[in-house]
Image (tube, helix red, strand yellow):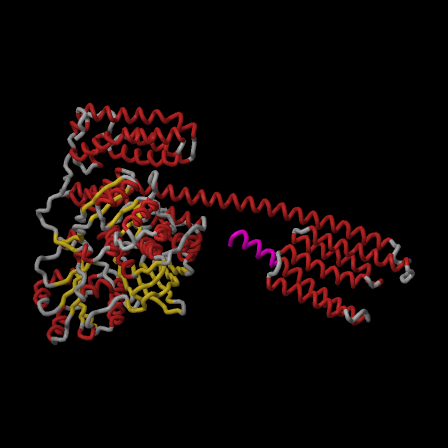
Amino acid sequence: MNRSQKDEENQRSIQLVLLLCYLMYTIGLAIAAVTRGWEMWTIPVMFLGVAISWSLYSTGHFEFRFRIYIYAGFISLATFFYGTHSDALYHSALIIVLAMLLFSLTEDKASLRILFVTYLMLIAYHLLLIILKREDSGNFFSSITLLNLLAVMVSNRVAGYVCEILSASRGVSDDLERQLGEMKQKSEDFMANVSHELRTPINVVIGLSSILIKDEKVDRKKADLNAIQNAGRRLFGRIEDILDYTEIDTDSITISDDEYHISSIINDVVTEYRETYGQTAPELVVDMCANIPARMAGDALKIKRIIRHVVTNAAKFTDENGCIFLKVFTRKKNYGVNLCIEVTDTGIGMSEEELRRVTAAAYQADSGRSRRVEGIGLGLSIVYGFVKEMGGFVHIKSEKKKGTKVSISIPQKVIDDKPSVVVDRSAKITAACYLKTSKYRSPAIREYYIAMLRSSFNDLGMPFNFVTELDALKSLVDTGNITHIFTAEEEYSEQKKYIEFIGRDIDIVVSVSPDFRIPRDSNATFVRKPVFSHSLVSAINRKLALWEFDPEVSGKRLTFEGVKALVVDDEEMNLIVAKGILAGYGMDVTLVRGGMEALHECEKTRFDVIFMDHMMPDVDGVEAMKLIRKHYGTDDHTMIIAFTANAVSGVREMFMKEGFDEFIAKPIESSELERVLKKILPSTMWQYKAIEQSEDYEYSFSDIDTSIAERFTVLDASEGIRLCRGNEGFFGEVLEEFMRDSEEVMAELQACYEKKDWTNYRIILNGLKLSARIIGAEELSREAQEIERAAAEKWDAYIIANHDSIEKRIEEVNADISRVYGGNAS
């Protein structure tokens, strides 16, 4: 509720109090008039005043101030009528005093004057009657009359003072609210800057490590690179948690309302689970109701984070022999559906006290005895905040040493109420499941798998036979009625010959672990665990196999060959990362470092997709996008993606509202990049292609030539070469690019410095900081970062004192490069 709404609500409350008191006062006067035989014609007049006052309150006619004057006028008339009677004069003073105190709440002194003048008129009226000898003067000229007059005068001053205090308090409140609003805006700006500053280097860590992993052939080095990438992703997750929690704490969350498919969200969650925990994870069993509406509208990103947090939290406190059961279903409502998410684990559980604390604040229950506790204890707080903001609820039930169950319900709109998972020709399918439940140590795993399979096949309307012994499976096969068999990796490996044999006539679907190697020319279809209804049905429909999830294991990968991509970013390092990732998909990638340069490039070439950074000097990403749209025309089908490290709540909605086709946050997540590109590009522009064993790579990671690295004195060349994918030739190209651009960078910095244009000065320093870091110029990078912070705070004195130092640092770096490479870095 904003300030004007609060004021209006407060005014309505004050009027309501005044009018209720006025109504009771009028009723009392009417009763007094009847019992004492006063003028009866005044009664309808008084109630007419009440009716007019209530109608003004209901309709809201006139300003608040004028309505108060009208109320005060009617009350004064009623009081004057009451006070004109000699036996009621003394009591009228009390009524005036009470009315003044009530009207002081309006902060309007004029209404007090109306009441005060009314009492003076009463005194004058009775004096006139005494002069005309129509009233006895004995009682009038008494101490009581003097005390009443004094009480009215004092009440008038006190009520006026109350008005002044309330008015002053309102002014202070307005100032405080304005300051809080400014602080909130600064906080939001700070969070946007923090998001950008932290995500950018993490983008490099995750992006370059991803490129290096694809190129690396040595297992030991590949394991090290995977460790680096996982550490980057973990840090990225912590930053996301801090940003989310801050938005919840400052009440600055923005909930989007986009169309999404729940099966895509579940697939992303289980894929992340596999990559994060691998073989050491507790078994994750996913039961997604097949009848969930195919398309719903809501905040898909926050729903995914909610599920991820709850599943991750369960994994932290469940050992590798335990189980996590994720159940997702919907309940129909008149507004759409309630999306229900239930996560049950067999972990260590919580006591009532721990449960109370974990739902009240950032707290990790029993973290000292957990198996793999990590994180900063914000997961459930974020879940509560997100769910509350979306109008849902969270319920947690837990018992020590028996596990925990988290139940979540979130209202969602329905776009398409058709089932999210549909089997082709389901009437012609008779399925059998061969699963040796005795292999599971935990009874819960057996129960959850059986429940998941029964639920999935019942939802799909397919006949289903569950067997645990090979002889029972053979008996079913011999009947000739079985069309599909579902089994797991262990059962397949033990009976491979038999299963492959019957696979010539029966469709075989096998769930396998992440490191399982698919045998060549197999008759089976393989899906990776954790499996759920979507992956099972896709395998049945022959639309999905393991290679869509795991190109390394299956030998197939997603490609966008021939797609022309333009990447617009003012930071050289981000361009290098983006080109390495996009080129890995077979795209024809063009790189530019500014909005106007992008427009000029679009005049020469028509691109299929454009990745546009937001924070750039001169022309920012939004303006550049609009210029390109205008240049290409309304019939153009070029997709423009907002590509930025600023990913705080509401940013995606802002970019989409501005006219972007999609949004991708840095650092680049391959699954998110592929999802977005497959969504916005025609299906003719992408395909899954077999990876040839002889496929060459542009760069290979090899041992660094320490003799070259040791020749530098200013640069930490060993780190620079590592960041350049371990290739000295590539490192030389980057050094050459740095030397070539450094003169232009200094000229731009100098121009901004002379104009005191600290906004663009800061943006240029940001690019310089990251470019210096990638070539190993740590001192230059550190100094650029410090001055960049000063520019963000417009700290002129610090900038002026250190500006010349930047130029000296760049000259030192260029001299070091020239000395080693003899003036030719390439």
Magenta-drawn stretch, dominant element (helix, strand or loop)? helix
Boundaries of the magenta span: 1-13
Residue 211 picture location, percent across and down: 20, 43
Name the spot of residue 814 as percent of width and height, x first: 24, 26
Please state if 208 lies on the left or on the right of 627 as rendered: left
Residue 510, located in which quarter of the rendered image? bottom left
Q: Tell me where residue 822 sits by quadrant.
A: top left
Left or right of 133? Residue 17 is left
Inspect this view and state whether residue 176 appears: yes
- Asked if residue 225 is positioned above or below residue 654 in the image, the reply reads above
Q: Residue at x 31, y 44 (%)?
A: 613
* Residue beneath the point at 21% across and 26% down: 817
Q: Is residue 505 left or right of residue 752?
A: left
Q: Considering depth in this image, is 461 or 365 the residue closer to the camera?
A: 461
Q: Position of residue 357 (x, y in %)?
A: 43, 53
How many discs appear?
0
Measured as percent of width and height from the top left, residue 260 is found at 31, 60
Task: Indicate the quadrant where residue 405 lies.
Answer: bottom left
